Structure formats: C-alpha cells, structure tokens
Image (cartoon, rainbow, N blue to C red):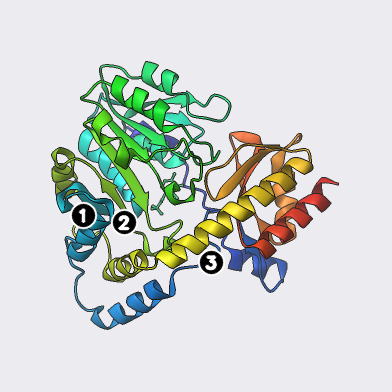
Amino acid sequence: MSLVAPGIAQLQPYDAGKPAEEVARELGVANAIKLASNENPLGPSPLAIAAAGAALANAHRYPDARGHSLHLKLAQHHGVEPEQIVLGNGSNELIELLVRTFVRAGEHVVFAEPSFVVYRMICLAHGVAFEPVALRDGTHDLDALLGAIRPETRLVFICNPNNPTGTHVSGAALVRFLAAVPPEVIVALDEAYYEYVTADDYQSGLALRAAHERLVVLRTFSKIYGLAAFRVGYAVAPSELTTYLERVRAPFNVNALAQAAALAALDDADHVRRSIELNTRERRRVGAALAELGLRVLPSQANYIYFSLNRLARPVFDQLLARGIIVRPFAPLPRDLRATVGTEAENDCMLEALREVLK
Ligand SMILES: *Cc1c(COP(=O)(O)O)cnc(C)c1O
C-alpha cells in the first residue's frame, strides 16, 4: 500500500519562484526586481511596521486567540457582525479551511482553470474530487461553472479578479450566477485583488449577499496592504458557516505581530490610496507598452498583467531572469507570462529587458 493518498502523491510543491535576494546573489548584481508574486511595490504602511515592532515586546505571550480587536475593526470596516468574520493565516488557510470543514470524501468542488492553483492543490491534499472549468476568452465562464455543479458539489471557488489572468466578471453576471447556484452549495468569492479594481461594472460579493445565502468573501492583507510576510487574510460569511470554520481552525492561527500590523494597516487609508493610484497608472502604461511589442495582453483589473508571447515563454523568462527581472511563468500555459505591476522604475526595467529579449 502506498505511503500517501493518491491526491497527495499527485501534488507538486507550490512554486513560489526564487526570492529576489537569491537571484541577485546568483547573478552577482546588487538587486533583482521581483515582479512575480503580486506584492505591493510601495511596501507596507509605516503604521503597520511600527505596530508590529511595538508588539515584539510581548512576544513571550500567546496571541489573542480570537483576534478580538481585528475582528471588531474588520466588522466595522465592512458593516458586518464580528461573528461573520474568520481570520486566517493568509487567505490561503481559509481556502483550506473551507475544504476541510465543508467537503467530505465523495463530495465535490468546482473552480475555474487557469485560476489560483491553491484550489486544486488543497482538493488534491484532502482527497476531494474537483472539476476545473476552462476560462472562456481568459475570463470565468459562469454558465459552464454552473453546468459543472452536481448533486455532490459542496463548494465553488470564483476568483474575481482572476489570478493569473487579471480578468473580472461583472456584478450583474455574478448576481445571475449566485441566484442560479443551488442554495445548499457554498460559493467562495476570492477577492484578493478587490482594491485594485477600477471597472464600473465590478461588484464585490459583500454587496451581493442577498443573491445567495451561503456566500463567502475572501480578502487578504498580502496584496494592497503590503503585509504578505505576516500571513493575514479573512473570510466574511454567514454565521451558519463561520461557527464551523472557527471550530476547525488552529488556535492562534494569526500571530500577534500580524494582528497588530493588520489593525494599523486598516488605519492608513492614504497608503491604500497611493497604492491604487500607482497601480492604476502603471497598469495602463505597462499594458499599452506590452501591446506595442505585439504581445496579446489580457485586460487586467488587478496588480499584474497577463500576456501571451508568440513563442515559448520559458526561454524568455530565463533571459529576463539573467537580467535580474523575475516574472512568473506557468508550466501548463507554455506561451504565457504574468508580470506584477511594480514602481515606474521597476516597470521600465522590465519593459526594457523584455524589448531586448524579444528583439
Ligand atoms: C495572493 C492570493 C491570495 C492571498 O494569499 P494569502 O494567503 O492571503 O497571502 C488568495 N487568493 C488569490 C487568488 C491570490 O492571488
């Protein structure tokens, strides 16, 4: 008998790419530019850094197990009840908690592909059946996702805007979808890039809760708040669901420094505003420059741009890496790359390197 379940045998470790320091060391250059993980190029809010620093003095204490203050603040921030919020060690943990808590052996999960690889990884790790539904024109195909729902389906993930493509589905389309999903099925809307959206027709799941009872909205402090290293995310969901998620999650899953940093980050609206402004401006500029290079660029509502080359992407990725530019290739999508929108200077370096490589 094999040591592990077939799903675990099939799993590949998550490929996070090389850290910038490692690339820089290997190349012998002072610094590499990392545009691979959709991090905020402006860094964290100074308020969050100071709050985490102040919390260090209490490092001998266990964190507030419920994350009381952060619960209250997020509840206030979103106009929901504190019981409707569950904190996670990154929204990654909440994706896993949803599967572990609500999907049993023999039951089934639906999500789009390509989308966030973690949905697939967690289903494999837990031996849960799943159906990936192909994007249409780089966008979630909501009708096909509906069609993939079976009597055994417990959970559907919708990533909006979608990672890695950056595309979004409209609020109107989402409302129709949510109303058509059988009421017992949980829909998890992963809104990791919510703050970057500028499209007028977009709506957050938080505004659409009337359309479907079992709706979960996932948010994170890893992207616009610039706190990826701290690992904090949260779910907003009806208390019918949060009561079970709270029982299954590990005690102290969000550490004290992370709680302090996240609380302070919520107070820095100016940092969020500057991050949005930079991203909106540079996303437009970089998208146009890539299109000018003759590449097929998908319209992005997030802080990254997805584009297709007319050749294999891996050698292009490698040559960019040799120039100290780290973008993101995807093994199942051999002609495509994703580049995070960086600072103006970082984007200029990336575009310059890409021009050279493609020449
Ligand atoms: C980055 C990302 C997350 C957030 O992950 P954390 O665990 O909160 O750092 C979740 N979903 C998607 C689609 C992402 O791209």
Mark 3 vs mark 2, foreground winner is: 3
Foreground disc of the pair 2, 1: 2
Is 65 above or below relative to 6? below
Q: Where is residue 299, by image quadrant? A: top right
Residue at image location 52% in from the left, 46% down from the top: 302
- The amino acid beneath tag 2 is Asn
Residue corresponding to mark 3: 42
Q: Residue at 47%, 61% (x, y): give it.
A: 273
Residue 125 can be seen, yes or no: no
Other-residue count near label 2 (Cα within 10 Å), few / some / many at <14 / 14–19 / ≥20: many
Is mark 2 in CB contact (under 8 Å) with mark 1? yes
Mark before the other along the chain sequence, 3 or 2:
3
How many callouts does the rendering have? 3
Q: Residues within 10 Å of mark 1 (few under 14, many from 20)?
A: some
- Name the residue: 27% across, 61% down: 254
Residue labelled with disc 1: 250
Residue ranking furthest to the front: 200
Mark 1 is on which residue type?
Ala
- The CA distance from mark 2 to mark 1 is 10 Å
**Circle 3: element type:** loop
Type of amino acid at the residue the image marks with label 3: Leu
Q: Residues within 10 Å of mark 3 (few under 14, many from 20)?
A: some
Q: Which residue is mark 2?
A: 89
Q: Which of labels 3 and 1 is toward the front?
A: 3
Q: Is mark 1 within 8 Å of ligand 1?
A: no
Mark 2 falls on what kind of element? loop
User: How far apart in space, not on screen, are marks 3 and 2 (Cα)?
Assistant: 22 Å
The one of 89 and 291 positioned closer to us in this rendering: 291
